[in-house]
Amino acid sequence: MTTSKPPHTAIVTCMDPRVRLPGVLGDAAAASFVLRNGGGRVTDDVLRSLVLCTRLLGVTDVGVVHHTDCRLQAVSNEELILKTGVDIDFMPISDPLASVLEDVGRLRSGGALSPQVTVWGGLYSVEDHTMRVIAGTP
């Protein structure tokens, strides 16, 4: 019987199918836990999943990858509430670089992840399918 090693990386990214992680992260993307949601934001549920990944499943590396041309850019939370009819925080993105740094900061300073977990952030370009690391090292 063959057993495979669990992935050591978890990546938080947007649900947008234009974000193609294997193209920029290679085999590491295929062997990672990938958590996708609108905007790739670090929500309470993402944090819950990352706690499970890092404390029970051996993940030691967490990446937060937002992208260019996100549909949550240039729209306010109030506009999204009006458009959807649902009054929740949609965590819109006014500046994708700032949102990556904000989410990386939340993970690094929140205390939920062990200090041994490496957290990094990147910005994926949907135009040319490249990624620029803007915080830490993947």
Image (tube, rainbow, N blue to C red):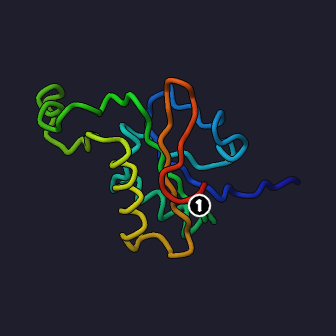
Residue at image x 13%, y 40%? 87
Label 1 Cα crowd, 10 Å radius (few <14 / some 14-19 / many 20+): many
Residue occupying the far right of the picture: 1
Look at the picture and state if 68 lies above or below 89. above
> Residue at image x 52%, y 53%?
63
Which of the 4 image quadrants contains residue 56? bottom right
**In x, y percent, where is residue 15?**
44, 34
The quadrant of the picture occupied by the N terminus is: bottom right
Task: Give the total of numbered labels.
Answer: 1
- The structure residue drawn at horizontal position 55% and vertical position 25%, both measured from the top left corner, is 128
| Front one among 30 and 75 | 75
Q: Is residue 40 left or right of residue 27?
A: left
Q: Position of residue 94 (x, y in %)?
A: 26, 39
In the image, residue 23 above or below residue 100: above
Left or right: 59 as drawn, with respect to 99? right
Image height of 67 relative to 3, above or below = above
| Amino acid at pointer 1 | Asp
Rendering coords of residue 103 (x, y %): 37, 55
Whole-percent x, y for residue 47 in the image: 40, 59
Query: Is disc 1 placed on a helix, strand or loop?
Result: strand
Up the image or down, 17 lies above or below 26; here it is: above
Would you name the residue on which mark 1 appears?
A: 61
Within the image, what quadrant is residue 34 found in?
A: top right
Tell me the quadrant of the picture where the C terminus can be found. Answer: bottom right
* Residue at (56% x, 65% y) in the render: 118
Between 10 and 23, the residue placed more toward the observer is 23
